[in-house]
Structure formats: C-alpha cells, structure tokens
Amino acid sequence: MVEHDHPAVLRRLQLMSLQQPWMILKNCWSAFWRRPPPVWLERMLLETAALKAVLAGVETENTELKAEVARLNARLKEGDNQSKTRLKWLAERVATLENDLSLRIRPHEVGGMMHARLLEGINVGRRVARLIDPNFPVQFINCPNRAALHKDDLVEEPRDIQGPPPPP
C-alpha cells in the first residue's frame, strides 16, 4: 500500500473511493439501459476505483476490485518506490481517467441525477490530486444538476480537505 501523510486525503478517499463513480454508474447504466455498461466504461471505472482504493489503503470485499487492486499494487512494486512519486502517479492517473470519463459520458446516457453524481465524484479526485500536488493542472467541472443532489452526494469545498482553518 502507498504510505502518505495526508490524513484528510485518506478520510475523503475512504468516503468516496468505493462508491463513486464505479458502482453507482455501473448499476445506474444497467438500470437505465437494461444491459451492462460497455467494456471500455467498466474497465475505466474499475481502474479508477482501484487507484483510489490503493491511495486510501481501503480494503474491499468486491472480488473484481480486489483483483484490480492486487494488479495495481504489483505494478507499483515494479516501479519507483518513492511514495511521493507513486502518489503523484496515482493521482495523475485518476485525474486522467476521470477526465476521459467526464468527456465520454453524456447525461442522456445515464440520467441527469447519476450524471451529476459522476461529475461530483470526479471533482473529488481532482481536489485530491491538487492536495497532493498544488501545481497539478486541475480544472473543476461545472455540475449543472448539483443543486438537485442529496447532501450526502455533495463534496465539501476544497478547504475541507486542506485541514482546519488557521487559528485567529
């Protein structure tokens, strides 16, 4: 597992990594279209969830996700062992995958509410990437249906994951 000293990142990822966007969108796609999602989508969602699970050190009961996490951990062991470099690579990979997802998934394909949840979940990954590397080129997505989301779906503003405010 990746070692790091960002407790706020860990907390945020534990809350979000195994919920969004993989299982939510996978289930939503199946319900909306009455068939499983395309293979490319399933692959991207699975890798994104695994990357976040590795970053957070989260254990999972899901067999597919366990296998993907094991594959990712093996790949990380082959490469550079400096955790900061690995953290940056993981964050970059999550942001790249999620950016691709945000461009390829359309609201009419999954329904407006699920699309809003997907975009909000992607913004979490981008906030985490920015926290790990303040110079990381991140552009947050405008989520048009954000006002309709339940409070449990919403992500706090970036100040929440940057730690408590400075003393007065």
Image: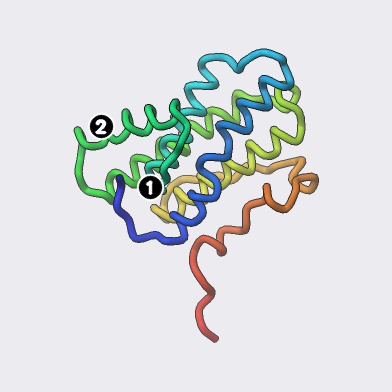
The spot of residue 102 in percent (x, y) is 60, 31
Query: Horizontal placement of 82 versus 68: left or right?
Result: left
* Colour style of the rendered protein structure: rainbow
The spot of residue 127 in percent (x, y) is 52, 51
At label 1, the amino acid type is Gly
Q: Residue at x 64, y 26 (%)?
A: 27
The image shows residue 142, relative to residue 69, as above or below, that is below
Secondary structure state at the residue bearing disc 1: loop
Crowdedness of circle 2 by 10 Å Cα count: few (<14), some, many (20+)? few
Which residue in the structure is indicated by mark 2? 74
Q: Residue at x 44, y 54 (%)?
A: 10
Q: Residue at x 52, y 34 (%)?
A: 98
Q: Residue at x 63, y 36 (%)?
A: 118
How far apart, in angstroms, are the residues tagged by discs 1 and 2? Answer: 14 Å
Quadrant of image for the N terminus:
top left
Quadrant location of residue 63? top left
Of 36 and 43, which appears nearest the observer?
Answer: 36
At label 2, the amino acid type is Ala
Query: Horizontal placement of 35 versus 4: left or right?
Result: right
Secondary structure state at the residue bearing disc 2: helix
The image shows residue 31, relative to residue 87, as above or below, that is above
Quadrant location of residue 32? top right
Quadrant of image for the C terminus:
bottom right
Crowdedness of circle 1 by 10 Å Cα count: few (<14), some, many (20+)? some
The spot of residue 152 in percent (x, y) is 68, 51
Of 15 and 47, which appears nearest the observer?
Answer: 15
**Picture disc at residue 57:** 1
- Whether tag 1 and tag 2 are in contact, CB under 8 A, the answer is no
**Picture disc at residue 44:** none
The spot of residue 67 in percent (x, y) is 37, 27
Of 106 and 83, which appears nearest the observer?
Answer: 83
